[in-house]
Each structure stands twice: as structure tokens, then as C-alpha cells.
Amino acid sequence: MSAQNFDIKISAGADATQMKNFNNGFTIIQGLPFKTGNELPQKTPVVSKIEGASSQTNYKVGFFADAEISKEFWNHWKLSISLGVNQLAYTYDTKLPANNLFEKDTMMKQISDDFGETKLLYINSRFLNVSKSFGRVSLQLGPVVNYLVHKKYNADFFIIDSVNSVFHVISEQRGNPKKLKLGGHFNLRYKILMPLEIMIGTQYFFNSIYESVGTYEGMYKKSNPLQLQLGLSYRIAYF
């Protein structure tokens, strides 16, 4: 095969994000009035903090899609670069220990089903990846860059006390996600037909997906996820 060969492929599939279990922190504000002025007696909200609350994580299914161009440089060895999107999705639940607001231990998902539901969408590039073909099988590895373009999760949760005309706020100590993430990528591809391959891969984030400012230390240190990917790759051009 000539050393001048180029391939252009498109790939798409599903991914599952695995996060480590971690300890979480919260700020609770109790007794915020619905109204102000003379309609209600002045009430001073009570502020308390919870630290070290145990959190259990679980994976969710996300997706990825990208286009890749590669060039063979020697004896079935190739260099490649890709550009696409990658969704990181996962969930978790945290046990709040008994406190001023709850008389007994309470799971946060009992307060809100949305708690812990996280979806982060990145522009994704595997740049200067190296691959080697062995007949129908090829292996690829190298660095990957992710740039955040959309986030979806809640960090503040409200409890209404209509009898006393007040509400309470439970705020998770969860800072903003980092815009730029670096990681490593590895995949294995098996050629089903001449242009079509099945792809199994993994991506690991080298550091936390959250900013340290505003994020509880236990969450910050454990939030470097591992993604498992399964999809199809199709060669659309060869020259």
C-alpha cells in the first residue's frame, strides 16, 4: 500500500460514563419567607453546612459522533485527526445525614428526581492519534481534547413549607465544569465489510471535570471519568 494513502471516516455510537463514588458537601438555608414587608413577621433564615455526605454514582448512556482523516506513513501505521461531539452522561445519589431540616438520613433523590442527573456536551478532537492495522483489526491510541459547549444539571433544590409560608434551599457544593479537558483515547476496530467497521473504545479524563472553586473537595478529586464507547465507523473516501 502506498505511503500517500488517505482515509476519511465518519463514526458514531453510544458511550457509558463511569465515575468514582465520592463524598459531597451541601449548604442548607432554612426559613426563607415567600413574601417581604409587613405581611409576615421578620424571620432570620438558618444556614448550615453538611460535609462528607456519601454519594453513589451510576452510569448513563450518552453518544458520540465524529469525522476523521488519517494518512498511512509506513507499513500499515497511520496518523489521524478527528473532530466531532461527545456527550458525557452520568447520575448519582447522595445520603444526607440527619440535620436541622430532616430528622433522619435522607437520599437526595427522594427530594428531587433530578438530583445528580448530569449531561455535558463537548466538541471533541482526537489529534495526532496513531493506529496500526493487522488485517481486519486495527488499534488506535493517542491524546484527546474536549471543549465544553453545553451543560445540563441542577445544583439548587427547593422545599416548600406552605404552612409556615417559607421555603428551604439545599445547595450542592458543585462548581462550574471546566471548559477544556484533556484525556487519552484508545479504540479497537474490526472490519465487518470493506468500508464498515465496528468500534470499541475508551476515553479517560486526566483531571477533574469541575473547577476547584465552588466544588466540594471530595467531588473535585473523584470527578475524572472513564468513558466506554461502542459504535460503527464508515469509510466515505479513500485517496
Image (cartoon, rainbow, N blue to C red):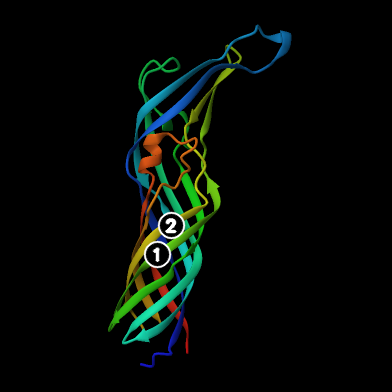
Q: Residue 229's x, y, as percent?
A: 37, 62
Q: Residue 70's x, y, as percent?
A: 43, 79
Whether 165 is drawn above or below 12: the answer is: above
4 vs 196, nearest the viewer? 4
Whether 77 is drawn above or below 29: the answer is: below
Q: In which quarter of the view is residue 11 placed? A: bottom left
Q: Is label 2 in contact with label 1 (beta carbons under 8 Å)?
A: yes
Q: Given the current orientation, which residue lies at the most extreme bottom position? A: 2
Residue 191 is left or right of residue 156, and the answer is left
Q: Residues within 10 Å of mark 1 (few under 14, many from 20)?
A: some
Q: Amino acid at mark 1?
A: Pro
Residue 171 is left or right of residue 186, and the answer is right
Residue that label 1 marks: 143
Please tell me the numbered disc located at residue 182.
2
Q: In which quarter of the view is residue 158 placed? A: top right
Q: Quadrant where the N terminus lies?
A: bottom left
